[in-house]
Image (tube, grey):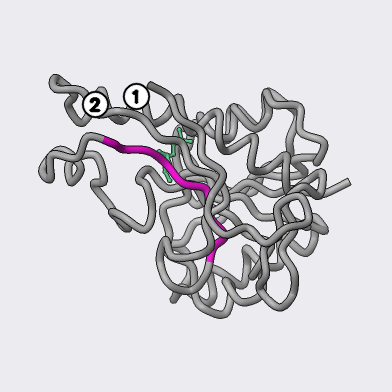
Amino acid sequence: MIKIAVLVSGSGSNLQALIDANLSGKIVGVISNKPEAYALERAKKSNIQTAIIEHKQYPNREAFDDVMHQQLLAWDVDLVVLAGFMRILSEGFVQKWQGKMVNIHPSLLPHYKGMHTHQRVLNTGDILHGCTVHYVTAELDAGQALTQGIMQVNLHDTVPTLAERIHRLEHVIYPQAIEWICNGTIQHHENGQVLYKGQQLEKPIQFCQF
Ligand code: GRF
């Protein structure tokens, strides 16, 4: 059984969706860089062990990442799931977990990497928006995309309404992507190739909500 660690910084609604999904993998631990993150409460309620590793207590990114790496090794983790984890990870850390670490981003990647995606979608006047589950590589929000949730932007949408609907979509596509990794439907080979049902994954599996 795949052992999963979830890295969080905030509310943890994606963590909750993963807990509720009854994955065939097991969430063995939750790491937060913020002691006040509500995600920690969610983990405790589900009897999942937690670790608080505060980035502020370490002299640099590498030192912080190394403590996280040691914790992941101590939990014997196979898969690292970033769920609202608000720290950029060092290249060394990302390399150690290459092909074993995924993230969810609130845009239809490769569009709108980085922050403030809802506002940027509104500014551009896009009619479609969404979220993307992708493998983590050293380049920010640039690893291979696995699943995507797509939705329509309505005339009266605002940043909060988009954020709310994107969150709901995330809670569908993230557990699905993680389950596919857990049950072998998605496989990441050491040469970097990603397979879906044994075939090379050319583009993300898309879920549309209209
Ligand atoms: C999500 O919108 C996700 O796309 C982004 O951070 C947010 C985390 O929300 N990476 P939550 O803490 O899971 O509620």
- Would you call the spot at circle 2 few (<14 residues within 10 Å), some (14-19), or many (20 or more)? few
Residue at (58% x, 28% y) in the render: 41
- What range of the chain is rendered magenta? 128-136
Q: Is mark 2 within 8 Å of ligand 1?
A: no
Question: Where does ligand 1 appear, by image quarter?
Answer: top left
Q: In the rendered view, tell whether residue 52 sits above or below residue 149.
A: below
Q: Residue at x 20, y 23 (%)?
A: 154
Please say if 97 is above or below 87: below
Percent across and percent down for residue 32 are: 54, 48
- The x and y percentages for residue 95 are 61, 76
| 31 relative to 27 in the view: left or right | left
Q: Where's residue 205, x and y in %? A: 56, 44
**Crowding near pointer 1: few (<14 within 10 Å), some, many (20+)?**
few
Q: Quadrant of residue 139?
A: bottom left
Which SS class for mark 1? helix
Residue 75 picture quarter: bottom right
Query: Is residue 156 a member of the stretch shown in magenta?
Result: no
> Can you give x and y, in whole percent of width and height, for residue 29 in the image?
71, 45
Tell me: residue 48, above or below residue 186: above
Q: Badge 2 is on which residue?
A: 160
Query: Circle 1 sits on which residue?
Result: 164
* Amino acid at pointer 2: Pro
Could you tell me what secondary structure mostly forms the magenta stretch?
Answer: strand
Q: Is residue 97 left or right of residue 56?
A: right
**Disc 1 residue type?**
Glu
